[in-house]
């Protein structure tokens, strides 16, 4: 148990396979994760809130083209972007989420605007964009969100579909970013943002913006941000399941997270992982695939980042 802060982030479970990861690429990912941790850590170290810290960390992840959110979001099969995001604080379980939006530079800030400026939790389309405009959030044009790597991935995926040779490369199937935190007051918060799946159908929404599936925060138990096969995470209500195991059965954060990811998710053929922080400041980063871009910062401890 700690009275200090804890911050844990992820850049998605869709990592490049280890046999294609060069030292140069790995160094780039580690450096990006470290920058993200620094953004959230600065807030927590100044007695800031967990909510502000996870928003700042996810904004930093959305600004990094290496990750599938914001600037680095993948393309739909029509060659467009549709982004989802959610944020939640654990004190009274306020939450805000957006789905299928395009335009705001940082979708996670749009989610927070929904939480703070409306009576709703989840908004889509023009309604969500109107809230972002009213909040005077910055918008960007399509060229800001274009990255050649994501476009090449779309082209390759559609080509494989046509030839009947589509593989199950997780770096194409799932990629999300997220952060969870406990601040010095003991409050928890979680934030998640994603561009979805490469070549997804227009209108597809995964688990990231769904409270209780890909995002959850409750001061009584834990804060969670998930990444992986969104349809399976939705079917399992993964974040809520971990929360319920902690509150109702007395399992520890490690036990609950490991069982849901290692057993329940695996049993349904889903792959992915999550980051979680407990009410006591402990944290867990389980995944059942080759790797997950992740990192953590605990007060009075060094920042650490991992890929595999």
Image: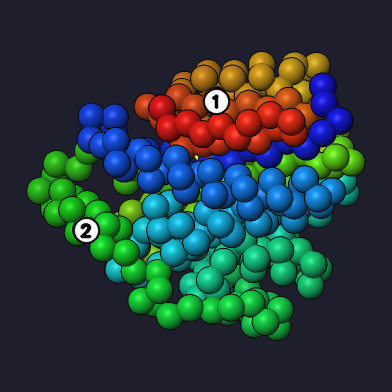
Which residue shows up at 20% across the image and 42% down it?
166
* Numbered mark located on residue 286 in the image: 1
Q: Is residue 293 left or right of residue 210?
A: left
Q: Can residue 234 be seen?
A: no
Q: Is residue 57 above or below residue 256?
A: below
Q: Which residue is mark 2?
A: 152
* Numbered mark located on residue 17 in the image: none
Closest to the observer, 121 or 131: 131
Q: Is residue 38 above or below residue 118?
A: above
Q: Is residue 94 left or right of residue 164?
A: right
Q: Residues within 10 Å of mark 1 (few under 14, many from 20)?
A: many
Residue 264 percent coordinates (x, y): 54, 23
Which residue shows up at 13% across the image and 44% down it?
164
Residue 289 percent coordinates (x, y): 40, 27
Q: Can residue 46 be seen?
A: yes
Q: Quadrant of the C terminus?
A: top left
Which residue shows up at 79% across the image and 17% down it?
249
């Amino acid at each position: 148990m700690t009275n200090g802060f804890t911050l844990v982030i992820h850049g998605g479970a869709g990592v490049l396979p280890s046999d294609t990861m060069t030292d140069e690429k790995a160094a780039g990912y580690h450096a990006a994760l470290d920058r993200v941790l620094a953004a959230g850590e600065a807030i927590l170290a100044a007695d800031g809130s967990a909510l502000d810290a996870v928003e700042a960390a996810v904004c930093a992840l959305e600004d990094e083209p290496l990750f599938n959110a914001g600037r680095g979001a993948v393309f739909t099969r029509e060659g467009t972007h549709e982004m989802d995001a959610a944020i939640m604080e654990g004190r009274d379980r306020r939450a805000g989420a957006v789905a299928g939006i395009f335009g705001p530079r940082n979708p996670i800030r749009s989610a927070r605007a929904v939480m703070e400026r409306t009576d709703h939790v989840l908004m889509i389309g023009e309604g969500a964009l109107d809230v972002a405009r009213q909040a005077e959030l910055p918008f960007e044009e399509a060229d800001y969100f274009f990255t050649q790597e994501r476009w090449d991935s779309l082209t390759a995926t559609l080509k494989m579909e046509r030839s009947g040779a589509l593989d199950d490369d997780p770096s194409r199937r799932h990629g999300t970013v997220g952060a969870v935190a406990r601040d010095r007051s003991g409050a928890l918060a979680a934030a998640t943002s994603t561009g979805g799946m490469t070549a997804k159908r227009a209108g597809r929404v995964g688990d990231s913006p769904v409270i209780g599936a890909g995002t959850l925060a409750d001061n009584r138990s834990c804060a969670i941000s998930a990444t992986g096969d969104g349809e399976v995470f939705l079917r399992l209500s993964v974040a809520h399941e971990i929360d319920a195991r902690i509150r109702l059965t007395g399992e520890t954060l490690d036990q609950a997270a490991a069982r849901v990811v290692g057993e329940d998710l695996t049993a349904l053929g889903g792959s992915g992982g999550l980051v979680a922080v407990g009410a006591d400041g402990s944290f867990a980063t389980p995944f059942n695939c080759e790797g997950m871009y992740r990192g953590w910062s605990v007060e009075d401890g060094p920042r650490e980042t991992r890929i595999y």
